[in-house]
Amino acid sequence: MSEDINIAIVAALIDAQPGYLSGSSLADSLELSRVSIKAHMDQLKNEGLRIEAIRNRGYRLISLPESLHPSVLEAMLRHERVTADFRFYKSIDSTNTEAERALADGCPTPLVIAAGHQTKGRGRLGREWFSEDPGNIYMSFVFRPHLAPSRMQRFTLWMGLELCAELHDQFDAPLMLKWPNDLVANGKKVAGILTEARIDSDQTRDLVLGCGININSNMDNWPEEIRQRATTLSQLKGTALDINQLGAALIRRGLNAYDAFVDGSYEKDFDSRWHRFNALEGQTVTITDHHGDHIGTIEGIDEAGALLMRDKSGITKTYQAGDVTLSGGLKPWVA
């Protein structure tokens, strides 16, 4: 109950910005005493919100926490008119693992699980995803699409393209999608996507899409190997970003992107998104799969989202999976 009240208070403070919110009117609307309102305000201050209190004027929100905050994030989600179920964990083993547990327990979907810290983050091909920094966002979208597996082939690409679009349109972040699931800028990784599904004979029953996005991390705390190949949005922008606002915007965009994918309306935008945010078009790359290394020039993707590469002999081959390494660095982003 206390958490619900805090969410309502934060939402009211955000709506009142940049003005003041009357303590008495807030107490009346929440059916609480002025003393109780002050206690909740003090709690929120202790949790990192800067709130100014002026006699006969009320309360004013000056600034929000620099890390993910459950009440602030949920208030932002209400502001974005997001109605999906939402769970937040200060720390968890993995949001994708928690999504699997939630599905096993029969959770309603869509569900979004977010965390400020992961102890066992997962990447593609069983790799570990370094996710111990509270300045980042780790989240999983949980769905039960009940669609034929053949319809899901471009799902991860579409979701990655939409996240790129949101980060560019709302935060002017010059990200591109490196097939099949990395968001990159200036040749360095900013975010990764991991899609996991439970498939019956004729339909995709359960679907989890996990995202790890580097926002305001202190890169000095990263292992040297990761600093060489990854960066953060704040590093790209030269300033810290509002992580709760950004998280809410990405959740809203992700849920809307899923709806568009399920009803098929995404198809009218897919090609334009792909040409705008594809980091590999015309690039010379090495694709590594279980057959070894394959060198050639990227020509695009097919209808199923598989990568098309022309090798040195001029033959175009199709790759459903593999790690892509670029020979000359990523092309610059163009608006």
Image: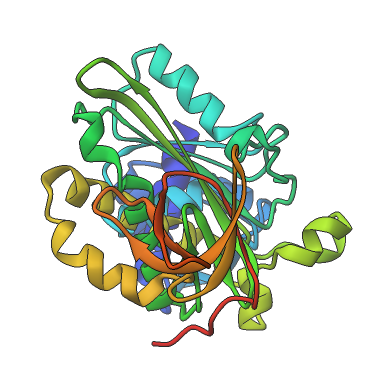
Q: Nearer the viewer, residue 330 or 112?
A: 330
Figure quadrant of the N terminus: top left
Extreme-top residue of the structure = 105
- Compared to 112, does 51 lie above or below? below
Q: Evaluate whether residue 81 shows in this view.
A: yes
As drawn, is 199 to the left or to the right of 182?
left
Q: Position of residue 72 (x, y in %)?
A: 49, 53
As drawn, is 311 to the left or to the right of 230?
left
Residue at the image position 32 percent from the left and 57 percent from the top? 253
Q: Quadrant of residue 335?
A: bottom left
- Compared to 136, does 240 lie above or below? below
Residue at the image position 43 percent from the left and 73 percent from the top? 281
Residue at the image position 41 percent from the left and 65 percent from the top? 14
- Please tell me how many numbered marks the rendered image carries: 0
Extreme-front residue of the structure = 313
Q: Position of residue 144 (x, y in %)?
A: 27, 27
As drawn, is 324 to the left or to the right of 209?
right
Residue at the image position 35 percent from the left and 76 percent from the top? 276
Q: Position of residue 193 (x, y in %)?
A: 50, 48
Q: Nearer the viewer, residue 174 or 70?
A: 174
- Compared to 169, does 202 lie above or below? above
Coloration of the structure image: rainbow
Q: Nearer the viewer, residue 112 or 70?
A: 112
Q: Quadrant of residue 15?
A: bottom left
Q: Evaluate whether residue 63 shows in this view.
A: no
